[in-house]
């Protein structure tokens, strides 16, 4: 009997140690993977939890991403525009189906030494911003605090160390519903100090935030990552038609837009910041997680950008 208990205990230890092999961390204003200073270069895959197929499609392309020098991705529990992914129960608990999909992605990335930005709230466009989902109509500060606290606790319980958290995409929830996102971040850090939490709104990060991303202002003391990098005016009339619940020009880039995208990428990476490429190609419903082509109408996609990254920024 004693041998059987010891064997079971050993097996449990092996299972528990299978994850958390790769660790994201921050020291000063730099980001690290396994204690090696590393610029995060990633892809915004926000709608990956849409269904099992989308999750599996993303995972099946991770090795290709890594070949091009990608070391991180972002995935949201609330999805993003047009996906209608509602990852939380009315009380702020994470829905089981989305836990399973997110787990698969985080663990697949961990095996490849990749980092996952885990998004909590997305309150924009034709989803929560217009209150089309009654689950969140009555949400207040208590519920959004619960959502982020439940998220960081779940990450810790699963020993996921290759992660950091975006509490509120572009500060949309704070602007739309007047939630206090600074309070969300501080509550998350109080609950689980070792999980890194970002700030993503048009202001300076609060003292409890670990890094600034996308809309967050750059500071000397914290790392900055552009987590939704696009050419100028990309998300306006070029990719969204008024009244249409779908993107247009999916994965299509004019020569001017490609040039501006590459210049923005180069400008931030050369200054030491991180950069995640965002595209209708990746964010469309259903998302396209294969790399596609040169961004032309006949060959849409993001291969052109990945080739630029591979040539100029992939770690040797």
Image (tube, rainbow, N blue to C red):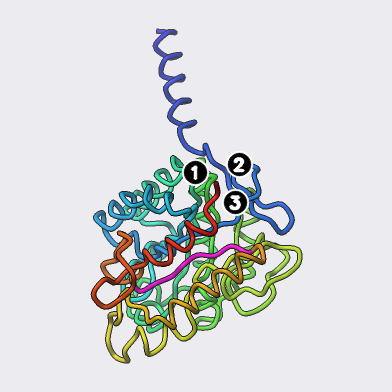
Q: Earlier in the sequence, mark 3 or mark 2?
A: 2
Left or right side of 302 for 286? left
* Residue 229: percent from left, percent from top: 50, 72
214 versus 30 height, above or below: below
- Kindly identify which residue carries mark 1: 113
Left or right side of 14 for 212? right
> For the residues marked 1 and 3, what is the alpha-carbon distance in whole angstroms?
17 Å
Does dot 1 land on a helix, a strand or a loop? Answer: loop
Q: Which residues are magenta?
A: 273-280
Q: Which residue extends farthest front?
A: 311
Does any portion of residue 91 appear in the rendered image? no
Does dot 2 land on a helix, a strand or a loop? Answer: loop
- Kindly identify which residue carries mark 2: 34
Residue density around tag 1, few if under 14, some if 14–19, many if 20 or more, within 10 Å: some
* Residue 257: percent from left, percent from top: 43, 81
Q: Nearer the viewer, mark 3 or mark 2?
A: 2
Contact flag, marks 1 and 2 (Cβ < 8 Å): yes
- Kindly identify which residue carries mark 3: 195
Q: Quadrant of the N terminus?
A: top left
Residue density around tag 3, few if under 14, some if 14–19, many if 20 or more, within 10 Å: many
> For the residues marked 1 and 2, what is the alpha-carbon distance in whole angstroms?
9 Å
* Residue 289: percent from left, percent from top: 32, 60
For residue 307, which quarter of the picture?
A: bottom left
Front one among 35 and 8: 35
190 versus 228 height, above or below: above
Q: Nearer the viewer, mark 1 or mark 3?
A: 1
Front one among 126 and 288: 288
Look at 41% across and 56% down and name the residue there: 94
Judge whether residue 309 is colored magenta.
no
């Amino acid at each position: 009997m004693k041998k059987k208990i010891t064997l079971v205990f050993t097996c449990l230890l092996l299972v528990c140690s299978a994850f958390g092999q790769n660790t994201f961390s921050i020291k000063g204003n730099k980001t690290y993977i396994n204690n090696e200073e590393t610029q995060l270069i990633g892809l915004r895959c926000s709608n990956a939890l849409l269904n099992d197929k989308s999750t599996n499609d993303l995972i099946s392309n991770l090795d290709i991403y890594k070949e091009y020098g990608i070391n991180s991705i972002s995935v949201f529990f609330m999805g993003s525009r047009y996906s209608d992914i509602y990852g939380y129960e009315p009380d702020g608990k994470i829905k089981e189906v989305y836990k399973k999909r997110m787990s698969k992605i985080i663990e697949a990335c961990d095996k490849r030494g990749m980092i996952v930005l885990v998004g909590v709230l997305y309150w924009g466009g034709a989803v929560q911003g217009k209150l089309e989902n009654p689950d969140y109509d009555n949400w207040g500060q208590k519920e959004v605090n619960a959502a982020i606290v439940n998220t960081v606790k779940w990450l810790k319980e699963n020993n996921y160390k290759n992660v950091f958290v975006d509490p509120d995409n572009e500060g949309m929830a704070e602007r739309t519903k007047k939630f206090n996102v600074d309070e969300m971040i501080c509550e998350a850090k109080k609950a689980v100090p070792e999980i890194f939490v970002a700030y993503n709104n048009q202001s300076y990060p609060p003292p409890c935030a670990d890094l600034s991303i996308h809309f967050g202002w750059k500071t000397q003391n914290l790392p900055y990552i552009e987590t939704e990098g696009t050419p100028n005016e990309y998300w306006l009339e070029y990719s969204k038609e008024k009244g249409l619940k779908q993107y247009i020009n999916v994965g299509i880039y004019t020569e001017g837009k490609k040039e501006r995208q590459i210049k923005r990428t180069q400008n931030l990476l050369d200054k030491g910041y991180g950069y995640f490429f965002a595209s209708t190609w990746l964010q469309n419903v259903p998302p396209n997680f294969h790399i596609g082509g040169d961004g032309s109408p006949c060959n849409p996609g993001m291969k052109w950008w990945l080739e630029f990254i591979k040539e100029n920024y992939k770690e040797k």
